[in-house]
Image (cartoon, grey):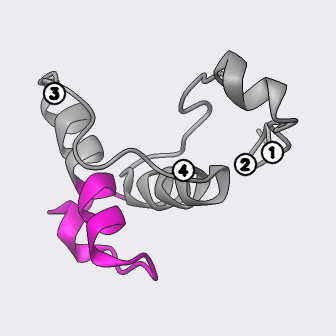
Amino acid sequence: MAIASTAEVQTLLPEPDDEISRRLVDARLSAEPLPGFPGPLPVTLEQAYAIQSASVDRWPDEVAAWKVARLTPTDRARGLRIIRLVRSEI
């Protein structure tokens, strides 16, 4: 089910995070690279995953995989762990 615009998808994200999600998906749909991350970097893993979830919801097809990420050495030293590895069943 294709959508006409990523703006049609309603999310509960604050506007800056919602705009990041829209810009990431629009860039992927148009196959155009972004010069950098399209907004302020997420401060928490929860914020990053919320942006990712909104982007997956915006994608006009089923998503099998979205991204690979890793924590910085500083974050790992602080004890942060990536706890959510899979969004949905395949």
Disc 2 marks a residue whose amino acid type is Arg
The answer to the question of whether label 1 and label 2 lie on touching residues, with beta carbons closer than 8 A, is yes
Residue assigned mark 1 = 84
Disc 3 marks a residue whose amino acid type is Leu
The residue tagged with tag 1: helix, strand or loop? Answer: loop
Residue assigned mark 3 = 34
Disc 4 marks a residue whose amino acid type is Ala
Bin the neighbour count of mark 2 within 10 Å (Cα to Cα): few under 14, some 14-19, many 20 and up.
Answer: some
Instruction: Work out whether mark 4 precedes mark 3 in sequence or the reverse, and give the earlier one.
Output: 3
Q: What stretch is highlighted in magenta?
A: 1-22
User: How far across and down, in percent of the image, does residue 58 sit?
Assistant: 38, 59
Instruction: Work out whether mark 3 precedes mark 2 in sequence or the reverse, and give the earlier one.
Output: 3
Picture residue at 75% right of the left edge, 49% below the top:
88
Instruction: Work out whether mark 4 precedes mark 2 in sequence or the reverse, and give the earlier one.
Output: 4
Picture residue at 28% right of the left edge, 42% below the top:
24
CA–CA distance between discs 4 and 1?
11 Å
The answer to the question of whether label 4 and label 3 lie on touching residues, with beta carbons closer than 8 A, is no
The answer to the question of whether label 3 and label 2 lie on touching residues, with beta carbons closer than 8 A, is no
> In the visual, does 13 lie left or right of 65?
left
* Labelled disc at residue 87: 2
Picture residue at 55% right of the left edge, 61% below the top:
50
Q: Is residue 21 magenta?
A: yes
Residue assigned mark 4 = 48
